[in-house]
Image: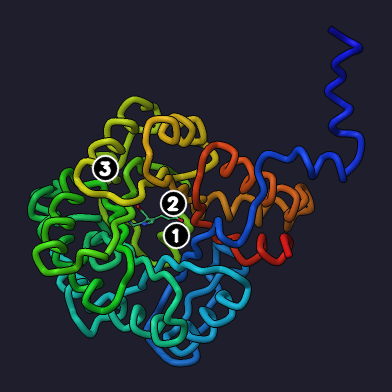
Amino acid sequence: MYPLRRNRRLRTNETIRSLVRENILSPNDFLVPLFVVEGKGVKEEIASMPNYYRFSLDLLEKEVKEIWKMGLKSVLLFVKVPDNLKDNAGTEALNAEGLMQRAVKTVKNAVPEMLVITDIALDPYSSFGHDGVVADGKILNDDTTAILAEMSLSHAIAGADFVAPSDMMDGRIFEIRTLLEDEGFHDTGIMSYSAKYASAFYGPFRDALDSAPGFGDKKTYQMDPANRAEAIRETLMDIEEGADIVMVKPGLCYLDIVREIKNAVTVPVAVYQVSGEYAMIKAASEKGWLDHDAVMMEQLTAIKRAGANMIASYFAKDAVKLIS
Ligand code: PBG
């Protein structure tokens, strides 16, 4: 059929390329992860995440106003909990006046239309740095899901629009949905980290929150990176249990999974481009080995092309500045 069909005709110049472009990033694509700490006037850079910060509540307020102005409409909140408040059951997670609960109210007061999503897992509150309750070196499933449901309710009461369980315990979506329904929080959504892998790319995040596991690893609850079918099974179960949005995490290494899940489900699919993915681009570009903006946009576009309806990314602000 050559020369009737020459694919390069559609690549001749930027005008035609932009007309045939299949995937375009916009501010609507992003969820902005934000790290919150106690204190006043605190904006501390995270060592392994250059140009990314932990904010105290007063500066969190400024930050969310700024990102709203940029067209970013959703935040994913994480808190760094002081050591003296950590215990095995993550008791502080249920404190109505805890840092997360105050952070939700702070964001909602500053920008009422901002979609506030809270992280649901015990690790920042756990004296063991695990996502669940520990006994005899094991992570207890059902004791943990009961606490996660109470934690979700507490965040909903504080004003969270969505809760995002990132723990990978079995049955937690059902437990959370049931309690939210029983308590009248019919409109509080659940974004489930449904296919979350036991990844080495979470390192910088654990620095950010001082939440690295104190013993062992997370392989008894997070998924084996070698598995594909299991990701579909986890995701379909979470949808049956009541998840409104499902997620694949990390991003880049798991885009095959993103595409398969996108083809298998009809709920929106989120992808988390995690801290290690951010750190790699920062480090290589600081060395002058990669073009920061080009690589960032290429990876984000690839995540969208794979099937992401939304992307949680530490690059959200950088990307939106480039887009506009
Ligand atoms: C906590 C949680 C983690 C991340 C999001 N929620 C860390 C972990 O599971 O150890 C990782 C995010 C990132 O690396 O950017 N359950």
Q: Amino acid at mark 3?
A: Ile
Q: Quadrant of residue 264?
A: top left
Pointer 1 with pointer 3, Cβ within 8 A: no
Pointer 1 with pointer 2, Cβ within 8 A: yes
The residue at the point 36 percent across, 46 percent down is 246
> Which disc, if any, is residue 202?
2
Give the crowd class for mark 3: few <14, some 14-19, many >=20 residues within 10 Å.
many
Above or below, 117 relative to 193 = below
Q: Amino acid at mark 2?
A: Tyr
The residue at the point 89 percent across, 28 percent down is 9
C-alpha distance separating marks 1 and 3: 27 Å
CB of mark 2 near ligand 1 (< 8 Å): yes
Above or below, 292 relative to 21 = below
C-alpha distance separating marks 3 and 2: 25 Å
> Which disc, if any, is residue 205?
1
Please identify the residue farthest to the bottom as the structure is shown: 40
Quadrant assignment for ligand 1: bottom left
The quarter of the image holding the N terminus is: top right
Report x, y in % for residue 30.
Answer: 54, 59
For label 3, the residue is: 239
Report x, y in % for residue 294.
Answer: 75, 50
SS of the residue under disc 3: helix
Q: Amino acid at mark 1?
A: Phe
The residue at the point 29 percent across, 57 percent down is 190
